[in-house]
Amino acid sequence: MPGWFKKAWYGLASLLSFSSFILIIVALVVPHWLSGKILCQTGVDLVNATDRELVKFIGDIYYGLFRGCKVRQCGLGGRQSQFTIFPHLVKELNAGLHVVILLLLFLALALALVSTGFAILNMIQVPYRAVNGPGGICLWNVLAGGVVALAIASFVAAVKFHDLTERLANFQERLFQFVVVEEQYEESFWICVASASAHAANLVVVAISQIPLPEIKTKMEEATVTAEDILY
């Protein structure tokens, strides 16, 4: 059985891994990975709008990995519409990259559960195999954190290099052309960053758990009886 010191740190490691699992689920469900401002370029060109009038043609958009919403402003008031990535909109995007992001996050979910199980195993008993010990916990956390980081990098690449926001803004638009004027990563994106950070923190936790504690030894003083003591 591991000592109380290691049990406490392994318990913290299991909590961090499981919290990463929960965070990824929240990031998948909440459609707030990115928000932005979209300009109705067609409306601006039609009325030859000045800088002060541009505000009337700037709408909003936000989206996640499965759905989103946009409010377009083309001079006639705001019109809100919702869209879903699957099955229609995925044809307008880089489908391969989008599917890779989802697969990476689902893989990260499984790896987070495995790292949780390894931490609980080490909290309950001392594994016979070294691969199931602290080294195994670190291995699974490195894999889980790396997969989440790769999913985050893939999403950033889709936004920056594949014009993800602009493609979503112009989906099923035949009369108007929209241009992205501002983009901002939202809570779901940062929740994924927190998930990867939890696995990085686990590496520190496991390292601390291996610090040897000073042992408190009590010396048993043996009473030595001599012949003089007996005579006395």
Image: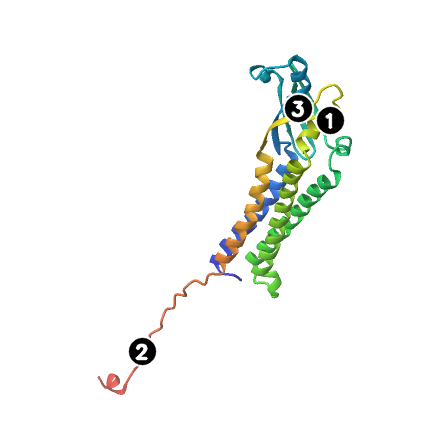
Where does the C terminus fall, quadrant-wise?
bottom left
- Sequence-first tag of 3 and 2: 3
Indicate the amino acid at tag 3.
Lys
Three-letter amino acid code at the position of disc 2: Ala
Point out the frontmost of discs 2 and 1: 1
* Residue at the farthest left position: 232
Q: Is residue 225 above or below residue 146?
A: below
Image coordinates of residue 223 in percent, x first then y, are: 31, 78
- Examine the image and state in which quarter residue 70 appears: top right
| Secondary structure of residue under mark 1 | loop
Crowd class of label 2 (few under 14; some 14 to 19; many from 20; radius 10 Å): few
**Labelled disc at residue 223:** 2
Q: Mark 3: give few (<14), some (14-19) or many (20+) Cα within 10 Å.
A: many
| Circle 1/circle 3 CB separation < 8 Å | no
The residue that appears at 33% across and 77% down in the rendered structure is: 222
Helix, strand or loop for disc 2: loop
Going from N to C along the chain, the mark reached first, 1 or 3, is 3
Which residue is drawn at the image coordinates 31% and 81% (left, top)?
224
What type is the residue that disc 1 sits on? Phe
- Of the residues tagged 3 and 2, which is closer to the observer? 3
Name the mark on residue 70. Answer: 3
Q: Is residue 214 above or below residue 223?
A: above
Closer to the chain start, of discs 2 and 1, is 1
Q: Going 47% across and 57% down the picture, which residue do you hit?
A: 5
Measured Cα–Cα span from mark 2 to mark 1: 91 Å
The residue at which mark 1 appears reads as 171
- For numbered disc 3, what is the local secondary structure? strand
Residue 29: give x, y in percent of width and height: 65, 35
- Disc 1 to disc 3, how far (Cα)? 10 Å
Nearest to the eye among marks 1 and 3: give it.
1
Q: Position of residue 66 (x, y in %)?
A: 70, 33
